[in-house]
Amino acid sequence: MGLEPTALLAATIDECVAPHRFKRIEPTPSSPTLSWVAAWKRKTWNTNRGIALIALPEGTGPAGDYALDVRAAVGKEIGYIPFLYELGLQLILCGTDVLKRGDGLDRYVTKINNSTVLLQSIHLVDLQGAGHRSVRTWGQVITGPFIDAIESALSRYSTSPPGKI
């Protein structure tokens, strides 16, 4: 018996980001508007990075607007500490027909380091296996390999039949 699509997606991401020392965490949702699927964290002496896999709620507007609306709440659950420790966030939004809500997605990644929750990449994944889309910000020296690993996982998921391993 295969895994549910969101569980399969999370397992695939987990497998691809683990070599980069991302650890799966269990966020304690503080906002009822967030539909957490999974989260990962990588914290070193000089970097604080997080990956959030969230179900994009039906009926919300553009995915980019939703990403901006939830980034601070998501960041706090993963490890952003205001005024002390910024967080580079890789946000993965999943659902059915999410790609249709991805117009202009590149406008929503963080362009200037504001020392808060930086949206370093946004990924949209159709849970029915209809594909994925990713955008990333500038300055990929440290974060680029993490985003590449996420994109690899999303490609693997998109070519696998949902619900099967």
Image (cartoon, rainbow, N blue to C red):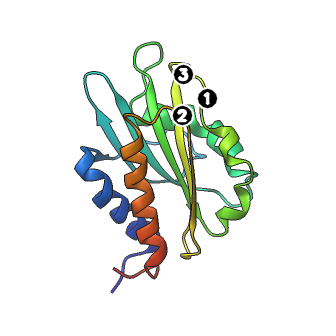
Instruction: Look at the numbered discs 1 and 2 and tell me whether their residues touch, using CB distance below 8 Å.
Output: yes
Q: Residue at x 48, y 33 (%)?
A: 75
Q: Farthest residue to the top: give it.
A: 83
Amino acid type indicated by mark 3: Asn
Quadrant of residue 55 within the rendered picture: bottom right
- The residue under label 1 is 111
Query: Above or below — where is 153 with respect to 85?
Result: below
| Mark 3 or mark 2: whose residue is earlier in sequence | 3
The image position of residue 92, as x and y in percent, is 51, 52
The image position of residue 16, as x and y in percent, is 31, 58
Amino acid type indicated by mark 2: Trp
Q: Which mark is residue 24?
A: none
- The residue under label 3 is 113
The answer to whether residue 162 is left or right of residue 24 is right
Q: Residue at x 59, y 65 (%)?
A: 95
- The residue under label 2 is 138
The image position of residue 102, as x and y in percent, is 69, 55
Q: Residue at x 53, y 43 (%)?
A: 121
Viewer-nearest residue: 165 or 108: 108
Residue 27 appearing in the image: no
Depth check, mark 3 against mark 2: the one in front is 2
SS of the residue under disc 2: loop
